[in-house]
Image: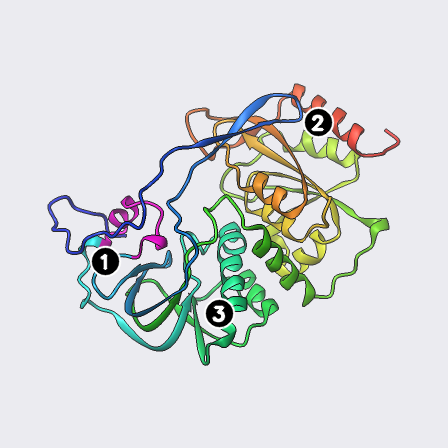
Amino acid sequence: MLYFNSKSPLLHPITVLGSENREVTNLKVRDITGERLAFIKGSMPLTPHYYSILTNSILYTLDGFVQNSDGTFLRDTYWTDIMLLEHGLLKHRRSLFYKKLKGNYFSLLLFYSWGYYHWFCDVLPRYVMFMETYGHAIRSLNILIQKNPPSWMKNSLELLNYNVHYVEFDGVYPVKIEILHFIPPLSMTGDHDPKWLNKVRQGLLKNISVQHDKQSLKRLYISRSKAPSRKLKNEAALCELLKKFGFEMIHAEDISYLEQIKLFSNAEWLVAPHGAGLTNMLYMPKGAQVLELFSKNTLRRCYFTMAQTLGIQYHSLFLMPSDELKTGTDLIVEDIQLKALFEFLKHKIKTSI
């Protein structure tokens, strides 16, 4: 990755559409023990919705930065100006090492679009909105995606089943696009557009065979024991408790994407540490319940707001991090929290315990 050098000239000015709003809103919530904390909700200077057709623009990196033909950067393709500096984009000359792409294009490359949550909650709602509103009328439309996309990315595009041609981009050298169709993000990441997130849900579920059986709905716990971060130090004690209430432990990374859809579409409960696996609430029936295990020093609102958008009942349990000075560290479920979780589930789930 190239980083900005203060001695390097700024070759292209930055065009800012609207001013940056750095105010934050605290979304106050209580976890199942009654502890009160707040999710911090920042804001990106999102412009009102528009549809634009750009000619001879240049697209950089797998995060989808777009440079206009006049050399300015399209503000709606990045969150803050510092992102341009961090990616070294202000040092690029427009004539330097790009590949030309002829024809009509729409890009699915967006901030962190390579991430599981961001793909399903940021990228696909924008894609579905574009296709149903504008894209269906564009002949020979090419869709730009990352090179060698993971199976879940390919499978989701196959399920949406749009009549388009996908073109892979490695993000190493920029591409100059003859005609780029563009709409801005539908919402700040961490927030969700209710209409289009639910449209994504409907589009994915309608093209896969899912057997709904209300008599055998599952209760799932997603383990992060194979993940590089945010593991539970005393997961065995938690799993022993959850097993009493009929929960099954799974590792989402061991299950194919299509099987995950089938599994979660028949789940009435999901318990998981904060992480991408919680994105699978997208397939759960409305009214299902999700319990997110959170580190007290890393509170993010994305799954709280996602649950609200999808009609899922959301609960949380704030846990102590193994290192309070770092984010992404392992979590500890203390005895008092296990006791509170037992009472909570006993109240929520009818059981003989």
Q: Is residue 87 magenta-colored?
A: yes
Answer with left or right where residue 309 lies relative to residue 70: right
Tell me, what colour scheme is on the image?
Answer: rainbow
Quickly name the residue at label 2.
341
Instruction: Identify the residue position indicated by label 1 in the image.
Output: 72
* Residue at 35% from the left image edge and 51% from the top image edge: 78
Tell me the CA gap for discs 2 and 3. 48 Å
Q: Nearer the viewer, residue 246 or 262?
A: 262
* Residue at image location 61% in from the left, 67% down from the top: 159
The disc labelled 1 sits on which kind of residue? Thr
70 to 35, vertically: above or below: below
What secondary structure is marked by label 2? helix
Q: Residues within 10 Å of mark 1 (few under 14, many from 20)?
A: some
Q: Amino acid at mark 2?
A: Leu
Q: CA distance from mark 1 to mark 2?
A: 53 Å
Regarding mark 1 in the picture, which secondary structure is present there? loop
In which image quadrant can residue 179 be found? bottom left
**Kind of residue at disc 3:** Tyr
Q: CA distance from mark 3 to mark 1?
A: 25 Å
Estimate the x, y position of residue 250 in percent, counting from the top left. Answer: 67, 46
Q: Earlier in the sequence, mark 3 or mark 1?
A: 1
Of 14 and 175, nearer the camera is 14
Q: Earlier in the sequence, mark 1 or mark 2?
A: 1
> With 12 as the anchor, is 48 left or right in this view?
right
Classify 201 as above or below 131.
Answer: above
Whether residue 225 can be seen here? no
Please rate how many residues cluster around mark 2, counting C-alpha atoms within 10 Å: few if below 14, some from 14 to 19, many from 20.
some
